[in-house]
Amino acid sequence: MFKGRHFLKTCDFSAEELHTLIDFTGELKEKKKRGIPHPYLKGKNLAFLFEKPSTRTRSAFSVAAYDLGAYPEYFGQGDIHLGVKESTEDTAKVLGSMYDGIEFRGYHQKDVETLAENANVPIWNGLTNEWHPTQMIADFYTLKENWGILEGKTLTYIGDARNNVAHDLLVTGAILGVNVHICAPKSLQPNEEIQALAKQYAAQHQSDLLITDDVAQAIYHTDAIYTDVWFSMGEDHSVLESRINQLLPYQVNEQMLINTMNPEVIVLHCLPAFHDVNTQVGQQIYETYGLTEMEITDDVFKGKHAVIFNQAENRLHSIKAIMAVTLGDLF
Ligand code: CP
Ligand code: NVA
């Protein structure tokens, strides 16, 4: 079912396969909590390539590798010749001859695909400009952990809806039978191609999709609210002023939670988040625009509806599940 496959984007997998990964995430979480060893990748050598920074994804891949009995090696931007003095294709051939599996976080989906075409070992996408598939397994596992089921529930994403996370939630939710509402100003709504893809899956899996700029309509009776940063890694900071002006009405705050009319609503964020001024960028934004919070207010971020840090922990268990099934002898 999974052995030897790459994990480049969730829509390469069937709904059944994604559900298997989500459920296996839960099994591995349980094993870890109970201290039951699970060395499914004993003795394997793994290469983790990061062109962009990372806290969660990098930590999750590393800790998961050790828990699975494998040996991780981290390569940051500038550590190897990749893309500068050596093509992605040649790098893939070399790394694939030495390592048993390779993670890549970077800019272009094309690069992770080139690695997959040439490395002859499983390639795992740790985020590109286009997709964030390991995040999706953690997120939908987190939703299932809270809701008990996925099918028929409603997830509302609000904010910059042209980015990797928004696109992936729309498509992955549609495959999994989750109703996905996307709420953003028209110019920041998912691109046409992604909308068309999601609509195809939604028709197959009975998911209702709504793409709107109307906040009240998008959040009414929703089961979860999800937001992400207003400018993503690799975007020029010059977009910031217009993003702030466009997205302030879409900030996740207490009043928005009240307006859902759902006292059980949960709040997710893939992190990192701008909910205070305790970061260099947060401080610069405060000095320039007078804002102390952006996509989510500090009270909601720290409030009782938020499941954000559990969601972050679940990156470990889900990435472990993905590596174990594609490289191990499990399924
Ligand atoms: N959510 C996420 O991918 O976090 P990092 O950028 O820290 O890996
Ligand atoms: N959309 C964000 C997600 C970070 C995990 C980015 O690409 O920067």
Image (cartoon, rainbow, N blue to C red):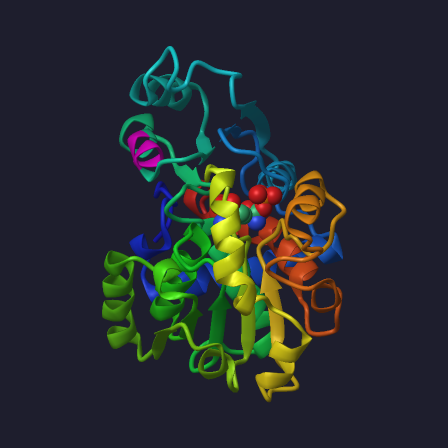
Question: In the drawing, does residue 27 fall left or right of residue 33?
Answer: left
Q: Residue furthest bottom?
A: 261
Say above or below: 101 vs 201. above
Task: Give x and y (percent) for residue 290.
Answer: 69, 53
Out of 19 and 9, give the one closest to the viewer: 9
212 drawn magenta:
no
Q: Is residue 254 above or below residue 92?
A: below
Between residue 273 and residue 25, name the one nearer to us. 273
Specify whether 288 is left or right of 81. right
**Is 303 left, or right, of 43 in this rendering?**
right
Q: Is residue 324 visible?
A: no
Residue at 75% x, 70% y is: 303
The structure residue drawn at horizontal position 44% and vertical position 19%, both measured from the top left corner, is: 98
Above-or-below relation of 92 to 324: above
Q: Is residue 235 left or right of residue 73?
A: left
> What's the magenta region?
110-114
Q: From the top left corner, tell me how far across and down residue 292 is, in percent.
A: 71, 55
Q: Is residue 183 visible?
A: yes
For the point 48% across and 77% down, which residue is it? 215
